[in-house]
Image (cartoon, grey):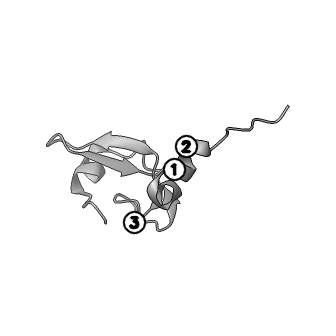
Amino acid sequence: MSKTNRGKALWKMPSHGRGTCPVCKTIRIKLLYTRNKSDGKQLKVCKRCINASQARVDDAQKVV
């Protein structure tokens, strides 16, 4: 059977969960994963950057 609620939470998020990844600078990509910077701030990153090194995450600037 098909799953009727798959991805429904994305439709309630602004821009359907999409934006620019602050680590790799890819535009219009889903930002679903949270990474912590060394200073305690949290960043939303893409699927490819969830395993990025902590140095790359610390160097990332929050893109609005």
Q: Which residue is mark 3?
A: 25
Which residue is more in the foreground, 64 or 52?
64
Is disc 2 in contact with disc 3, using a CB cutoff of under 8 Å?
no
Type of amino acid at the residue the image marks with label 1? Lys
Q: Residue at x 61, y 44 (%)?
A: 8
Q: Quadrant of the C terminus?
A: bottom left
Task: Give the image location of residue 33, x and y in percent.
Answer: 43, 43
Which residue is more in the foreground, 53 or 58?
58
Element assignment for label 3: loop
Quarter of the view holding residue 34: top left
Type of amino acid at the residue the image marks with label 2? Ala
Q: Residue at x 31, y 49 (%)?
A: 43
Q: Earlier in the sequence, mark 3 or mark 1?
A: 1
Q: Which residue is mark 1?
A: 12
Few, some or many residues within 10 Å of mark 2 (<14, 14–19, 20+): few
Q: Quadrant of the N terminus?
A: top right
Q: Is residue 16 left or right of residue 54?
A: right
Few, some or many residues within 10 Å of mark 1 (<14, 14–19, 20+): few
* Eye-nearest disc, 2 or 3: 2
Residue found at the very far front of the displayed protein: 12
Element assignment for label 2: helix
Is disc 1 in contact with disc 2, using a CB cutoff of under 8 Å?
yes
Task: Give the image location of residue 30, x and y in percent.
Answer: 51, 55
The mark found on residue 9 in the picture is 2
Type of amino acid at the residue the image marks with label 3? Lys
